[in-house]
Amino acid sequence: MGTEPCLELLVLASPERCCTKRRSMTKVAEIASDVFFTDNKINIAGLVVAGSADFKNMLMESNRLDPRLSLKVMMVVDVAYGGEKGFHQAIEMPRELPARVKRDHEEKLLKKFFHEI
């Protein structure tokens, strides 16, 4: 797409979906790299990592996330819900971030991410 990189939300799935938290973190990090890179170049301006419980913090501390993505993390937020309800809650949280978010591009990338999970 000929659009400028935008802010993206990475809403983490619950770690119970895989056998171990370590495998879950690895899988989420791999999918994030697949979705948020195009031709080995980052395609976002910023990233908000959201999830319930401590999984999001463990991911950030694990060094599994590509370092180029880690540099783009603008916020790590806790949401009260999982799934689609948690996704919508996470969208509402970073309102104080710059308004350069382009929703169509963001939603397309996030749908691709969730499809991969």
Image (cartoon, rainbow, N blue to C red):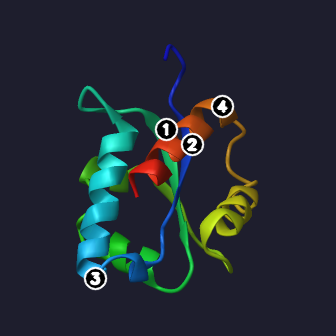
**Disc on the earlier residue, 3 or 2:** 2
Name the mark nearer the viewer: 3 or 2. 3
> Label 1, on which residue?
45
Q: Is residue 32 above or below residue 1?
A: below
Q: Secondary structure at mark 3?
A: loop
> Label 4, on which residue?
104
Residue 75 percent location from the top left of the image: 55, 62
Q: Which residue type carries mark 2?
A: Leu
> Label 2, on which residue?
7
Q: Quadrant of residue 50?
A: bottom right
**Disc on the earlier residue, 4 or 2:** 2
- The reply to whether dot 3 and dot 1 touch (C-beta < 8 Å) is no
Q: Secondary structure at mark 4?
A: helix
**Disc on the earlier residue, 3 or 1:** 3
- The reply to whether dot 4 and dot 1 touch (C-beta < 8 Å) is no
Q: CA distance from mark 3 to mark 4?
A: 33 Å
Q: Which residue type carries mark 1?
A: Ala
**Disc on the earlier residue, 4 or 1:** 1
> Label 3, on which residue?
19
Q: CA distance from mark 3 to mark 1?
A: 32 Å
Residue 100 seen: no
Q: Which residue type carries mark 4?
A: Asp
- The reply to whether dot 2 and dot 1 touch (C-beta < 8 Å) is yes
